[in-house]
């Protein structure tokens, strides 16, 4: 069986070595003698990471195909170095039944660019009133373990309690979109001096922090697992830190955009910077970066939220919330955390691969780049840099906030279960990927 040899990569321990992949698994690491028929990837100067895993992706299919499909979204994921994504439930129909989550999982398997693990809705229709069929979704072929009403908060404390109690019985986790609905009615941007100046309704930090404070206590009370989506404020970091010290089973994520951008970007009313939760103050950005570095925040998750041009090229108050993030996530993490000395590449593997996989219950990522492990691999050139533009985006939508910014790093190769999805910095064509992956 011919293999694929990655030659001379920088491995997670800092040493340089080869990686040989045979039949979808890592066969050897270190100094490898090529066998007849082996394909070679010259990885000189490249960092080898385990395939990235995104715990918070909006693929939009079914129902939102004008923004993204499973195919276009997983192509964007592969381009960004991802080999697995967790697809949020705010589709149409909502992913609140076994049928819908199995449909989404099957599409991911059919296309082969990345493993698609659907996230199940917590409540029917994301309406926050009645628990969805959590057990049926967990027992389905989609093996759902993460449940979220993302885009909406599970605001009713009794519903949240019941959801936490239920997922504790199936080894699952509730991923909360922490947004107190009454405190954020009509909210458009971070509440502060600037929202007053711009005349845009504010989204106060306390609307996030008060929900997180309630939910960590509910998680303790029910002895269940809580994951906090897109933490955006210094106060939320303090609450999560307190809960972890108390031994509560809580994990938390931050998005790349909240590690870089502030509410100052709203000054020109450019709706590319409109996102939920909103971009906050410089002090919040600083607290979030420090929280990733000290482990209070466990992972980076993209909250990839594609929207067609017409939903963004309009007045701020009419525009949709959200920005794409799969293709730029690794560069933003390098720019804000690695190049600032706050995180090394082993830390990048932790926050963008092994830990999101562990939180989501996704097997195959707990022994990164080890012999015998499934061959999910990403090769990145940390020395490359590029002026970010929509021209290079492979997803269906172009609502990136980074146009014109020079970002470091470039994904040179992505390998999903031994199947190259990116080679020489370019996506491998869809037919080749689907055929090679064979609907595994
Ligand atoms: N994060 C966003 O700004 N948008 C998300 C949902 C949401 O959280 O509002 C989307 O699905 O578009």
Image (cartoon, rainbow, N blue to C red):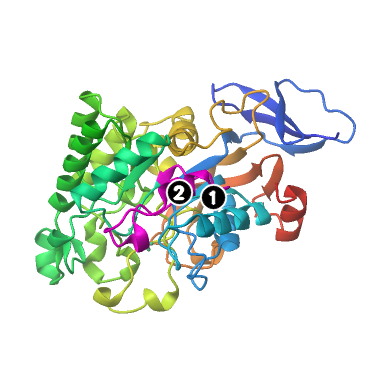
What is the magenta range?
120-146
Residue 224: in magenta span: no
Horizontal side, residue 78 vs residue 347: left or right: right
Where residue 400 sits, quadrant-wise, is bottom left
Query: Residue 217 placed where, x, y %?
Result: 18, 35
The Cα–Cα distance between marks 2 and 1, rounded to whole angstroms, is 7 Å
Q: Quadrant of ligand 1?
A: bottom left
Pointers 2 and 1 in contact (C-beta within 8 Å): yes
Looking at the rendering, in which quadrant would you find the N terminus? top right
Per the image, the residue denoted by label 1 is 80
Image side of residue 80 versus residue 218, left or right: right
Q: Residue 5 occupies which quadrant of the picture?
A: top right
Most frequent secondary structure within the magenta stretch:
loop
Query: Which of 318/347 is in front?
Result: 318
Query: Is residue 280 visible in the rendered structure shown here?
Result: yes
Secondary structure type for disc 1: loop
The residue under label 2 is 329
User: Which residue is at a point 54% across and 50% down the rendered structure image?
Assistant: 80
Q: Nearer the viewer, residue 71 or 105?
A: 105
Residue 282 seen in this snapshot: no
Q: Tell me which residue sits at (33%, 35%) in the image.
A: 225
Q: Residues within 10 Å of mark 1 (few under 14, many from 20)?
A: many
Is residue 281 shown above or below 183?
A: above
Where residue 153 appears, x then y in whole percent? Answer: 26, 55
């Amino acid at each position: 069986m011919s293999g694929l040899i990655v030659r001379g990569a920088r491995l997670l321990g800092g040493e340089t070595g080869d990686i040989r992949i045979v039949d979808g698994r890592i066969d050897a690491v270190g100094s490898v003698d090529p066998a007849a028929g082996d394909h070679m990837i010259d990885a000189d100067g490249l960092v080898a990471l385990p395939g990235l895993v995104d715990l918070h992706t909006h693929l939009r299919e079914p129902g939102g195909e004008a923004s993204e499909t499973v195919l276009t979204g997983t192509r964007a994921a592969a381009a960004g170095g991802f080999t697995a994504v967790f697809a949020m439930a705010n589709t149409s129909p909502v992913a609140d039944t076994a049928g819908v989550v199995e449909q989404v999982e099957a599409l991911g398997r059919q296309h082969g660019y990345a493993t698609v693990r659907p996230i199940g809705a917590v409540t029917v229709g994301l309406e926050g009133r009645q628990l969805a069929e959590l057990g049926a979704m967990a027992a389905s072929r989609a093996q759902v373990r993460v449940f979220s009403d993302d885009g909406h908060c599970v605001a009713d404390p009794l519903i949240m309690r019941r959801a936490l109690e239920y997922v504790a019985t199936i080894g699952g986790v509730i991923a909360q979109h922490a947004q107190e609905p009454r405190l954020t009615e009509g909210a458009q941007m971070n509440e502060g001096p600037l929202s007053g100046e711009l005349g845009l309704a504010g989204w106060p930090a306390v609307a996030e922090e008060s929900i997180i404070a309630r939910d960590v206590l509910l998680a303790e009370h029910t002895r269940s697992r809580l994951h906090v989506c897109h933490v955006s404020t210094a106060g939320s970091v303090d609450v999560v830190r307190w809960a972890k010290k108390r031994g509560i089973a809580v994990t938390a994520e931050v998005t790349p955009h909240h590690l870089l951008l502030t509410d100052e970007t709203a000054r020109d009313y450019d709706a590319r910077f409109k996102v939920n939760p909103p971009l906050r103050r410089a002090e919040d950005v600083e607290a979030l970066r420090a929280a990733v570095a000290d482990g209070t925040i466990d992972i980076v998750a993209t909250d990839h939220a594609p929207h067609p041009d017409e939903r963004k090229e309009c007045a701020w108050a009419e525009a949709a919330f959200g920005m794409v993030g799969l293709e730029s996530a690794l560069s933003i993490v390098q720019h804000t955390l690695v190049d600032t000395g706050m995180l090394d590449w082993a830390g990048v593997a932790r926050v963008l691969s092994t830990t999101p996989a562990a939180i989501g219950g996704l097997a195959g990522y707990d022994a990164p780049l080890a012999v015998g492990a499934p061959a999910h691999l990403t090769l990145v050139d940390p020395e490359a840099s590029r002026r970010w533009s929509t021209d290079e985006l492979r997803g269906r939508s172009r609502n990136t906030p980074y146009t014109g910014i020079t970002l470091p790093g470039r994904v040179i190769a992505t390998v999903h279960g031994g199947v190259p999805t990116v080679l020489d910095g370019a996506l491998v064509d869809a037919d080749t990927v689907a055929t090679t992956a064979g609907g595994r």
